[in-house]
Image: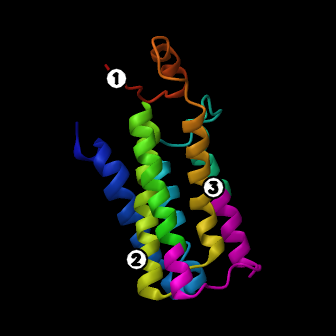
Amino acid sequence: MSFLHHPAFQSLVLPFVLAVAISLLLRPLGLRWSSLGAALGLLLAMAMWPGFDWPAASRAQTLPWLALGSTLLAALAIALKAPGTRAMGRRNGLVATVLLTLIAFGLGAWGALGGSLLLAQLALMLATVGGVAVLWAWRAASVSPVSLLPLLLTGAGIALCLAWLPAAGPGAAEGADVDDPYYAPRWK
């Protein structure tokens, strides 16, 4: 297995590097745009892995599309200077991003213990870019509520996919392949 295809690289290193780089590149456009860097980093990381499959044959394959749609809506809101694009205060921004990151780590644990390594890896991608949002809110003292919307909706999508997993039991191993097309762990 090459380094680029290793799950730790795909879920931890790649989203972090992309989110930081995009946030720094968007910094000259203003704080509204640079706070969107975490969502764009998640979107590009999901574009590289697992990718955009159409038609989405499973619930997990809809998550990159959900991230794309919500990021486009957030970018449109920022471009139109809609309400909710103004930066929150440092304290409120830190609290919101830290809670979002902790919830994403919880989703990752739920996915790993629930039997879907794909959803656990996607939740870790979300937690990683959430960590970048925490760093950005702390360092730049700026985070826009609209820029957190794609992260929140992707987290809700992961939670729904985890909630709809087949129940663990003797017959659950056959149903796991249907919803987890990339790989389906079989816990012994």
Query: Crowding near pointer 2: few (<14 within 10 Å), some, many (20+)?
Result: some
Q: Quadrant of residue 83?
A: bottom right
Q: Is there a contact, CB below 8 Å, between mark 2 and mark 3?
A: no
Amino acid carrying label 2: it is Leu
Cα separation, mark 3 vs mark 1, equals: 29 Å
Viewer-side label of 3, 1: 1
The residue that appears at 41% across and 51% down in the rendered structure is: 124
- Where is mark 1, residue-wise? 187
What main secondary structure does the magenta stretch of the protein show? helix
Q: Per the image, is 93 magenta?
A: yes
- Where is mark 3, residue-wise? 153
Q: Which residues are magenta?
A: 70-95
Q: Secondary structure at mark 2?
A: helix
Question: Would you say residue 48 is visible in this rendering?
Answer: no
Q: Nearer the viewer, residue 96 or 174?
A: 96
The residue that appears at 55% across and 45% down in the rendered structure is: 158
Cα separation, mark 2 vs mark 3, equals: 20 Å
